[in-house]
Image (spheres, rainbow, N blue to C red):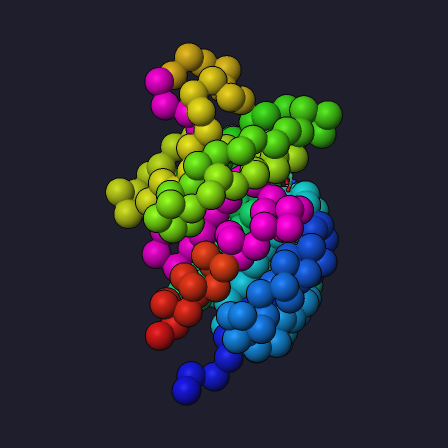
Amino acid sequence: MASPLRIGVLALQGAFAEHIHALGALREAEGLGDIVEVRTSAGLAAVDALIIPGGESTSMALIAERRGLLDDLREFARTKPTWGTCAGLILLAARAVHTKQGGQRLLEVLPVTVSRNQFGRQVDSFTVTLDSPCLGPGAAPFEYVFIRAPAIVSVDDPEVEPLVRLPAGVGQTEASESGLLVAVRYRNLLGTSFHPELTSDTRWHRYFVHMARAALA
Ligand SMILES: NC(=O)CC[C@H](N)C(=O)O
């Protein structure tokens, strides 16, 4: 039997404890191995898959850079299963718009452009319940939580698979027939604008576990 999957959560800043909690809830059913807080290059080298949580992408990148972890994170995300949620999605992206003056460091592994804080400030946070066929045939709707979230405003590689789109109009400044993209998959990468770790619904975590397992098989 294959050894149990070891999933790490980047624990420099942000909502890492919530992801660890969500993975913990799946541990037995999914036969997960250690669920690890990753803070160093050695810690990263010891996991099979990684979640980069929500938080503040500029701070997270700065801390990672100071710890000499940024290049290792980039290398990891190039080939190993990696999921970025919210700020984590920004870090994975090839390009970000509406960044702070002077720009910000990104891992540049996911060929999309994200717009930071697309939906406004903290007070404009919102939830929306959407059908999510990517979670399985006949899957019940999922409650999506958005907190100063980015949106994916352009997809720059045909291999990027759109997974979830908001209804047209939500968070958009320009009239457009299709809504903003808030979840994509690309090879070994999953990027989501929302925070599934803030709900008790673990289906997105399960999606990532299955994706990671398939990628590593
Ligand atoms: N909840 C979040 O992760 C917000 C992300 C934040 N707006 C950023 O740019 O990093």
Ligand 1 occupies quarter: top right
At horizontal 51% and vertical 53% (from top left) the residue drawn is 203
Q: Is residue 24 above or below residue 97?
A: below
Frontmost residue, 178 versus 199: 199
Frontmost residue, 58 versus 28: 28
Residue projecting furthest to the top = 175
Q: Quadrant of residue 78?
A: bottom left
Residue stretch rendered in magenta on the structure: 177-205
**25 with respect to 167 (left or right):** right
At horizontal 64% and vertical 50% (from top left) the residue drawn is 200
Q: Quadrant of residue 181?
A: top left
Quarter holding the C terminus is bottom left
Question: Residue 67 location, x and y as percent?
Answer: 68, 63
At horizontal 38% and vertical 16% (from top left) the residue drawn is 176
Q: Is residue 51 above or below residue 147?
A: below
Quarter holding the N terminus is bottom left
**40 with respect to 115 (left or right):** right
Question: Residue 70 location, x and y as percent?
Answer: 58, 59
Frontmost residue, 117 versus 183: 183
